[in-house]
Amino acid sequence: MILPERLQGGEEVRELRPWLNRLRDFAASLLPSASPAGGIRIQRLPSGCFFSADIPAQSGGGTSSSASGEYEGPFAVVSSGTGLVKVYSYNADAGRLWESLIILGLEKIAVTETEISASEGHVWIEITYSAGNYAYEIKSGTLPAQSASLLAVPLAYIDSDSNITQMQFGNIVFPGRIF
């Protein structure tokens, strides 16, 4: 899709509606995992604009959450038994028809649903780059220090009572180079 020309000063709001609709459609096309029933959020920050998508729950619109109010979208960390946690991603059998994605510039990596052993501490996804390829691994324990070849993105924190505090909501997006 080709975006329209730059806006000119003094244009009426009704004249902007088609332009904004085209911009919204373009932004939605960049995140193919976003449902048409969801919305695109544009947040203006000092460093630029941040685009994100709301993933609707199976029961209705808005961000994905269960009836209990817990987050159940991409990279949701949930207890799946004593000492085990599951990091959600695509799972047609469970009704999760979206993917957990890591978007690194022009690279898009789909993360598989993963169950790991976890106790008190962080659950994170470790992204590494070597010989022109990105790799990821979901880990738990003490969060490692960042380095020139390692990026650790915290997904959740598990306290001493096994309560899970979600830290990452939605897909992981780095619009520029990270390594």
Image: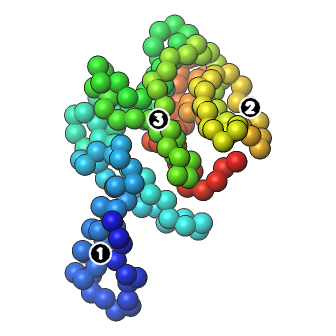
User: Residue, x 35% and y 70% (percent of image)?
Assistant: 2
Mark 3 vs 2, N-terminal side: 3
Most foreground residue, 61 or 30 = 30
Q: Position of residue 165 (x, y in %)?
A: 53, 30
Q: Position of residue 153 (x, y in %)?
A: 62, 38
Which quadrant would residue 83 be assigned to in this image? top right
Mark 1 is surrounded, within 10 Å at the Cα level, by few (under 14), some (14 to 19) or many (20 or more) other residues, namely some
Which residue is disc 2 drawn over? 144
Q: CA distance from mark 3 to mark 2?
A: 23 Å
User: Measured along the vertical axis of the image, is residue 176 above or below residue 55?
Assistant: below
Which residue is disc 1 drawn over? 19
Which quadrant would residue 120 be assigned to in this image? top right
Work out which residue is located at the far front of the displayed protein and give it. 131
Q: Position of residue 111 (x, y in %)?
A: 49, 31
Which residue is disc 3 drawn over? 110
**Dot 2 amino acid type:** Pro
Most foreground residue, 146 or 109 = 109
User: Residue, x 51% and y 7% (percent of image)?
Assistant: 82
Decide if residue 92 is in sight here. yes
Question: Tag 3's secondary structure?
Answer: strand
